[in-house]
């Protein structure tokens, strides 16, 4: 009986740990030209439906708050499927740019962060798999 209780507790703990890990969201640090870009998505892995993205941009350690930031998310082309390519402007809120991405199906997606600042355009990309 004790073995069954211990086994049940271990299984419960593993589910609890897995749920906590996924609820933390996805955090990625990338470079885009001269900029350091920290990207946070509220779900890890992202899901079909709405996913909130937050982008912090720094140059020489200082926050960049006067850029135009575009989030372009798209699925790689597939035979006999219409292209899935979406763009949304990220709005500045408290020194971070925020937007919502709506993934319409599960699978691999590319996210491009396009920064237009001081007359220059810089870009960084990341790949995610939605569930």
Image: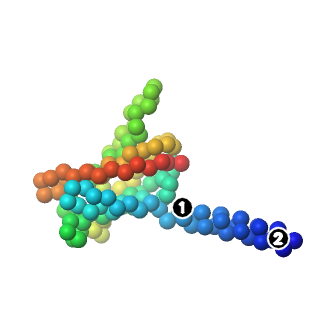
Q: Earlier in the sequence, mark 2 or mark 1?
A: 2
Left or right, 126 with reference to 8: left
Can residue 1 be seen from the camera position used here? yes
Q: In the structure shown, which secondary structural element does the residue marked by tag 2 occupy? A: helix
Give the residue pinned by disc 1: 22
Q: Residue furthest right?
A: 1
Can residue 89 be seen from the camera position used here? no
Residue at the image position 50 percent from the left and 54 percent from the top: 45
Q: How is the image coloured?
A: rainbow
Q: In the structure shown, which secondary structural element does the residue marked by tag 1 occupy? A: helix
Q: Nearer the viewer, mark 2 or mark 1?
A: 2
Q: Are marks 2 and 1 in contact (CB under 8 Å)?
A: no
Where residue 92 sits, quadrant-wise, is bottom left
Residue at the image position 25 percent from the left and 51 percent from the top: 123
Tell me: residue 101, above or below residue 14: above
Q: Nearer the viewer, residue 44 or 34?
A: 34
Q: Residue furthest bottom?
A: 2
Residue at the image position 53 percent from the left and 48 percent from the top: 131
Where in the figure is residue 110, as x and y percent of width and height? Answer: 38, 45
Where residue 84 sits, quadrant-wise, is top left
Q: Residue furthest front?
A: 3
Mark 2 neighbour class, 10 Å CA radius: few under 14, some 14 to 19, many 20 or more: few
Where in the figure is residue 80, as x and y percent of width and height? Answer: 45, 25
Where in the figure is residue 56, as x and y percent of width and height? Answer: 30, 64
Residue at the image position 23 percent from the left and 71 percent from the top: 61
Left or right, 129 with reference to 13: left
- Tell me, for residue 104, which label it has, or none: none
Q: Between marks 2 and 1, how big is the CA–CA gap?
A: 29 Å
Where residue 1 sits, quadrant-wise, is bottom right
Give the residue pinned by disc 2: 3
């Amino acid at each position: 009986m004790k073995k069954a209780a211990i086994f049940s507790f271990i299984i419960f703990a593993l589910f609890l740990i897995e749920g906590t890990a996924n609820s933390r969201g996805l955090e990625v640090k990338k470079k885009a030209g001269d900029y350091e870009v920290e990207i946070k998505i509220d779900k890890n892995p992202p899901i079909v439906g709405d996913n909130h993205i937050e982008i912090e941009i720094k140059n020489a350690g200082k926050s960049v708050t006067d850029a135009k930031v575009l989030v372009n998310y798209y699925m790689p082309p597939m035979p006999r499927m219409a292209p899935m390519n979406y763009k949304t402007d990220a709005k500045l809120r408290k020194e971070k740019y925020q937007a919502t991405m709506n993934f319409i199906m599960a699978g691999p997606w590319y996210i491009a962060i396009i920064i237009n600042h001081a007359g220059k355009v810089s870009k960084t990309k990341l790949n995610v798999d939605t569930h």
